[in-house]
Image: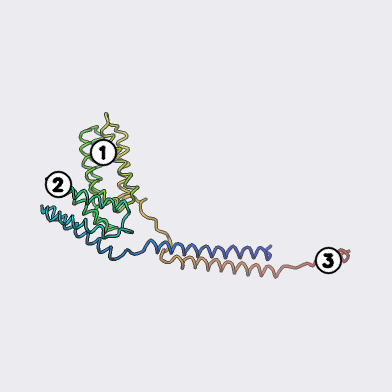
Amino acid sequence: MFNYSSMKWLTTTLLLAVVISISSACGVSTSTIGQAAPIDPVQVERIAFLNQIADEMYKQTMDGQVTEARNKLMQMSDQIPKIHFEGITSVEGLNALTETITQAKRVYNAVTYSPEEGQIAVAKIRLATDALTHKNQPMWLQYHKVLQNDTNILHEAVKANKQKEALANFGKLSQHVAIIHPSLLISRDASSVEKLDSLLTFIRTNLNSQPMSIRQLESALDHLNQVLDDLFLKNKDAIAFVPLTDPRQPIIWSLGIGLIIVSVLSFVGWRMYQSGRNIVHVKQTKEGENR
């Protein structure tokens, strides 16, 4: 049977649920707004200019215009301190970019210029600056099939127990990974890239062992395919979770729940009132009157 105390307790509980629901919505809204904060347009323009310089440097290098490409490299080096990378990439990504430019300087300023090393160096820079300007579809994603093919060829050599061939194939795989490595650190979480690095180190160590541990290498190569799929977002589990509610309207959604709770509260209160009308109150009599 309902009484005043139980009704008061139920009212307090349901009202508290409304407050929590609305408070949670406000929290989600604040978080969403914080994550979607726009980047300074000036910085976006500077990064786009950096990407343009890298593109010109790449074309000049491929055309054999080494002096012109070197000038573009120095121009890029001058632009880096003028850019604020907060919200664009992580500290690891920024370090990878600056280290890539530093390594390229050594190649282009060497006494004897190596065209092959120059092409590799400029490819790293071109992919890295593109990763800064194209978050969703960077060019380095095109390397997935290349790495997948490298891994499959390496796997076949391991299964056939051809150590020299396997080492040669691993060298090609490592070179292709090195080209996109700065871009990975710019676009992906550093811990995910560290998994890839650790796995490649493990594979290299086992390939150089005498004799090769075929079972361990096959297991490591299978794991390598999974890590690459995650980095290239080919794994379905890597897709970000999308909430059922629209994050742009969490307050409206929660207020709707609040109105439902209030409606239920009103209905319960009305039922309690109706049931209270049907109760027959019995007055307590004195012992003398009952005798």
Q: How is the image coloured?
A: rainbow
x and y percentages locating residue 180 in the rendered image:
24, 49
Name the mark nearer the viewer: 2 or 1: 2
> Of helix, strand and loop, which one carries label 1?
helix
Q: Which residue matches tag 1? A: 155
Res 291 label: none
Residue depicted at x 24% and y 37%: 156
Judging depth in this view, the residue of 142 and 93 nearest the camera is 93
On screen, 165 above or below 290?
above
Nearest-to-viewer mark from 2 and 3: 2
Q: Residue at x 31, y 33 (%)?
A: 215
Q: What SS does tag 2 mark?
A: loop
Looking at marks 1 and 3 on the same chain, the residue that comes earlier in the sequence is marked by 1
Q: Earlier in the sequence, mark 2 or mark 3?
A: 2
Front one among 272 and 93: 93
Report the number of discs. 3
Dot 3: element: loop
Asked if the residues shown at circle 2 and circle 1 are in contact, with their CB atoms under 8 angstroms apart, the answer is no
User: Do the CB atoms of the residues marked 1 and 3 lie less than 8 Å apart?
Assistant: no
Kindly report the distance in space between the C-alpha atoms of the residues bearing marks 1 and 3: 96 Å
**Which residue, given by chain and number where applicable, does mark 2 sit on?**
110
Q: In percent of the image, x 70 and y 70: which residue is there?
A: 277
- In percent of width and height, residue 235 lies at 33, 49
Q: For mark 1, does the 10 Å Cα neighbourhood hold few (<14), some (14 to 19), or many (20 or more) residues?
A: many
Q: CA distance from mark 2 to mark 1?
A: 37 Å
Bin the neighbour count of mark 3 within 10 Å (Cα to Cα): few under 14, some 14-19, many 20 and up: few
Residue 68: % across, % down = 12, 56
* Looking at the image, residue 252 lies above or below residue 231: below
Badge 3 is on which residue? 285
Instruction: Indicate the quadrant containing the N terminus: top left, top right, bottom left or bottom right.
Output: bottom right
